[in-house]
Image (cartoon, helix red, strand yellow):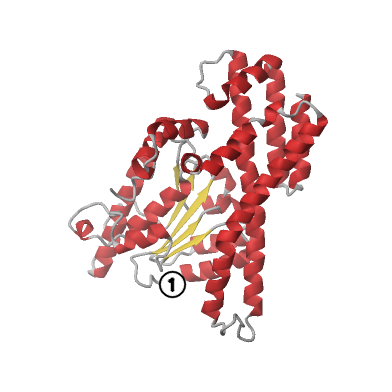
Amino acid sequence: MSVWDDLVGQEKVSAALEAAARDADALVTAAAADQPPPEASKMTHAWLFTGPPGAGRNQAARAFAAALQCVSPDRALGGTPGCGFCDGCHTALLGTHADVSSVAAVGAEILVKDMRDTVRKSYTSPANGRWQIILVEDAERLNEKSANAVLKAVEEPAPRTVWLLCAPSIEDVLPTIRSRCRHLNLRTPPVAAVADMLVRRDGVEPEVAAAAARATQGHVDRARRLATDPEARRRRASVLKLPLRIEEVGGCLKAAQELVDAAVEDAKQLAEEMDGKEADELKAALGAAQGGRLPRGTAGVMKDLEDMQKRRRTRTQRDSLDVALGDLTGFYRDVLALQLGSRVAIANEDAEDALQRIAGAGSPESTLRRIEAIAACRDALDRNVAPLLAVEAMTMALRAG
């Protein structure tokens, strides 16, 4: 096993990253021996990983970070860096390596204040690793100020610093930033490859793995959650029943409320798991006295944490809604395939009765309008329209057809 094993269906990307990791290792080895760097190195200081949701952009970047920090003895004997077991690989994959910093959007944007310390760190030498690595998981969410901060750091990098940026597409990143990055585009993994990964890595039953991979159309993270979390399967089943519940206005409004309530509950569950732990860890780091009393002058730090957690809850709610809307889009895509007599495999085989009923009651044109209504709801949520208002407008449009 190695750090590359979780890159499902990304053979070309894996090969490119492995080659770069070997050259990166040669660069560090040459520098340590005070020798000139190798010629024609495939390693560069900035990388841009793009691909559709679920393709594994962040996983690829994290695997590359682990390979760059690999300290396996086999690597020194000519093996490919990225063993997956050494301290460098293990801590980089877990997110605890001192020289691997991750930045992700907590709210709708990555703010410049969230980037300042990271940009400052990018100019320092590695503390105990081989490279100083900055991983930006949601580069498309950089706002103007934070993007400019990243641009300056990418334009004038420190010798042993590597920037790893992840975004859905190359157009989502400023031209001035992407022009300074080596671009790797990931594809949607084949359904069979995702199912095989779930069986091999997570011990999922083959039938359950195949159903989850097919239902999520190759989205690795969602397939894993669907295969391993009964609550996720329950929520998805509820979403797929929505098209049968919107024949009346009252049904539309009730379905919209339930969809939003489920997203709120998802965000609340995540907050309960993370917020208290983060607060306790920060209080301990600040030297809180017995009983939780904070030292003078540290209240502002706790307030910043609370603000961050509030933004994260809002984003989690919207992300949960987006998953539901994706499931709904997949349902109507299957309806359209049935109406057109397409040979495309149905993703939602477990909802075939509902698919047949909706397909027989409408036309391809009405189904396309419904898919457009879901897309409009997603756009409205991206513009920070109140979730309940956006979802109610969508369910009314689905009813109208």
Which residue in the rendered view is the most extreme toward the right?
249
Q: Vertical placement of 140 versus 30: above or below? A: above
Q: Residue furthest left?
A: 77
Residue 256 appears in the rendering? yes
Q: Which residue is mark 1?
A: 124
Q: Is residue 238 above or below residue 40?
A: above
Which residue appears farthest toward the bottom when viewing the image?
296
| Left or right relative to 210: residue 340 | right
- Secondary structure of residue under mark 1: loop
Question: Which percent across, then down, holds residue 157?
Answer: 45, 64
| Residue that appears at 58% across and 50% down | 140
Is residue 69 visible to us here?
no
Q: Position of residue 224 (x, y in %)?
A: 46, 42
Dividing the picture into quadrants, the one containing residue 329 is: top right
Q: Position of residue 258 (x, y in %)?
A: 71, 41
Q: Position of residue 355 (x, y in %)?
A: 61, 21
- Give residue 373's quadrant in the image: top right
Residue shown at 35% from the left, 48% from the top: 17
Asked if residue 10 lies left or right of residue 392, the reply is: left
